[in-house]
Image (tube, rainbow, N blue to C red):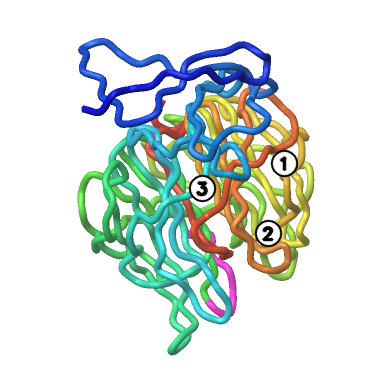
Amino acid sequence: MGRLRANTIKNSTGSTGPIFVGPAEFSTTAHVVLPKGTTGERPANPATGALRYNTSTSQVEYWNGTSWIEVAWTDPSNRGVFGGGYISPSTTNTIDFIGISNLGNATDFGDISVSRGDFGACSSSTRGVFGGGLTPTPTFLVLNVLDYITIATTGNAIDFGDLTVVRSDPVACSSSTRGVFGGGFISPSTTNTIDFIGISNLGNATDFGDLTQSRFGAGACSSSTRGVFGGGFDYPNVYQNVIDYITIASTGNATDFGDLTVARYAIAACSSSTRGVFGGDAINANTIDYITIATTGNAIDFGDLTVARANLAACSSSTRGVFGGGSSPSNTNVIDYVTIATTGNAADFGDLTLARYNLTACSNTHGGLS
């Protein structure tokens, strides 16, 4: 080991500390304490590669020569996954992931088994399942395919089985054991079909019942007992503000819940164990509204997305909702987030690996698992 020289350097507050020049080796069973301070106390002109702990965000960050970046680390037990979507005029098989508790850009996960958009996703604490969809090239094809991933690892999706009905634009929600797919589009009309799977068991979906209104492009979320479907588009009624719900552990038709604040479709939804949040709109609105899942009633204004957009996807932890991708009207890779228990506007999270719309998302920590 080379000799260390300790010089001093001033930080943004004017205090000094040692800087070592030359090879350094630490051999200890204890730990190293990084420099720390609030966002406002960041050094003004740090050296590229400088490392510190931000007490405002509770994250380790480094200076890349231009800005402070959070160190990329994603807890596999707190992971959101975004799959597929359109990169006009074709679709993509891309899957990428984020650590929901850590701000930052998404990372490549693998590929879905069939490149497609306009599909739904549900998940347990270990497995994510993608269902249905549409692939426009090389030939227009509507799908009933189900495929799955193990969320805590990375890799390509594997065949799971088939939905009961070939369709595009279904939405999905789940408990810790059961995934439910509702609605969708079967040319030339919409459907009210609901079907379900046991997430831990490979195989085809089984009929569950019907939504109160045939539609596609809705948003879906859940608590551990109740699944909720909001918004959508139907002929000839066009935009829908309807919210209906099911008891996930049973089967049967959905029941009226209330109305969204604005009739709309091409939206996304996520939830904690108590509150569901719906965001986006096909007319590129930034609307976010919310419901209390255990009760019935109309949605209440929550705030605004950072970018007005449609055809986005959402996932969540027990505390944070994350919206990714969409069209505004061009493809976007924007990821923004909200704190589900409060109200207010979304804040920037980072970027997807690929700008796209009509993608889908799921997580291993959503409200249906609580």
Q: Earlier in the sequence, mark 2 or mark 3?
A: 3
The magenta-colored residue range is 187-193
76 or 19, which lies in front? 19
> Which residue in the protein does label 3 denote?
105
Cα separation between marks 2 and 1: 12 Å
Q: Percent from the top left, x then y, of residue 9? A: 56, 20
Q: Which mark is drawn over residue 288?
A: 1
Query: Which residue is at the far bottom?
Result: 139
Q: Percent from the top left, x then y, of residue 167? A: 46, 70
63 sits to left or right of 330: left
Quadrant location of the N terminus in the rendered image: top left
Q: Residue at x 53, y 26 (%)?
A: 319
214 or 24, which lies in front? 24
Q: Nearer the viewer, mark 2 or mark 3?
A: 3
Q: Residue at x 24, y 61 (%)?
A: 158
> Which residue in the protein does label 2 denote?
310
Was residue 328 drawn as part of the magenta stretch in this picture? no
Residue kind at label 1, given as amino acid type: Ile
Residue kind at label 2, given as amino acid type: Ala
Q: Percent from the top left, x then y, of residue 331? A: 64, 66
Q: Quadrant of residue 284?
A: bottom right
Can residue 269 be seen at all in this image of the molecule?
Answer: no
